[in-house]
Amino acid sequence: MADDSLISVIIPVYNCERYIAQAIESVLAQEYKNIEIIVVNDGSTDNTEKVVCSYANVKYLSQTRNGVSMARNTGIQNSSGEFVAFLDADDLWTKDKLKIQNSLFSDDPDLDMVFGQVEQFFSPELEESLKGRIDLTAARMPGYLPGAMLIKRNSFLKVGFFDIGLRLGEVVDWYMRAVDYGLKSFLAPEVVLRRRIHDANTGIKERDYRKGYLRALKSSLDRRRKGEKKVEASG
């Protein structure tokens, strides 16, 4: 990876006027500067569009409400970078995120994707009653999430786009496809993503996420069984 390779940063957003500016600012503050920022508005009904369009150096796209997978896919289709990164509209990057991951690609050109550590934090406006129900003891964890990943564009396209048919678990589904495909990855020890905990991503949604995970796991196992049957048939 050349030191000046263009990195396309895709930010999907839906009704996130409270946080989207902070997310964009965390990208603009990156020590690595050769980036293009693409925000895809997934049918927001609040003031998200006004906030995003106040940034002259951000490419703004809008679509009818189709979900985060479609928004990420739309961003990729309209990007021009050799590398692709993602950031959810309510999360933040550390300022050296892209610099750290860029250097790892430089050290090992055979890498397809690089992840980093994730640090969770309570959003300032979160009610104390909700904070008491959420355990952040293990606030730092390995980040196999889009927001903690930097990936070669060609490698992403080999795996394919996010499954728009999955309401939850689409990230797990994509990652398992990447593993099945044999992409080479590396997990950096540094924190690269700060994941915001707020009232719209806790509670029942976590239980729904586990259901989505199980569906994605089943799809991965089905793919592997089909591959085994093909090998047996050819033998």
Image (tube, rainbow, N blue to C red):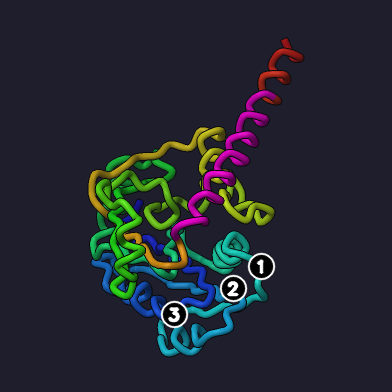
In the displayed structure, does residue 161 sit left or right of residue 142?
A: right
Please tell me which residue is depicted at 43% across the width and 36% down the height of the picture. Answer: 184
Q: Residues within 10 Å of mark 3 (few under 14, many from 20)?
A: some
In the displayed structure, does residue 219 sit left or right of residue 38?
A: right
Dot 3 or dot 2: first in sequence order is: 2
Q: Are marks 2 and 1 in contact (CB under 8 Å)?
A: yes
Residue highlighted by disc 3: 58
Q: Residue 42 bears which disc, if any?
A: 2
Residue highlighted by disc 1: 66
The reply to whether residue 160 is in sight is yes
Please tell me which residue is depicted at 66% across the width and 31% down the height of the picture. Answer: 223
Q: x and y percent of residue 20 in the render?
A: 41, 76
Residue nearer the viewer, 64 or 135:
135
- The magenta stretch is 202-225
Q: x and y percent of residue 9 in the render?
A: 43, 66
Reply above or below: 127 against 54.
above
Q: Main secondary structure of the magenta part?
A: helix
Q: Residues within 10 Å of mark 2 (few under 14, many from 20)?
A: many
| Mark 1 residue element | loop
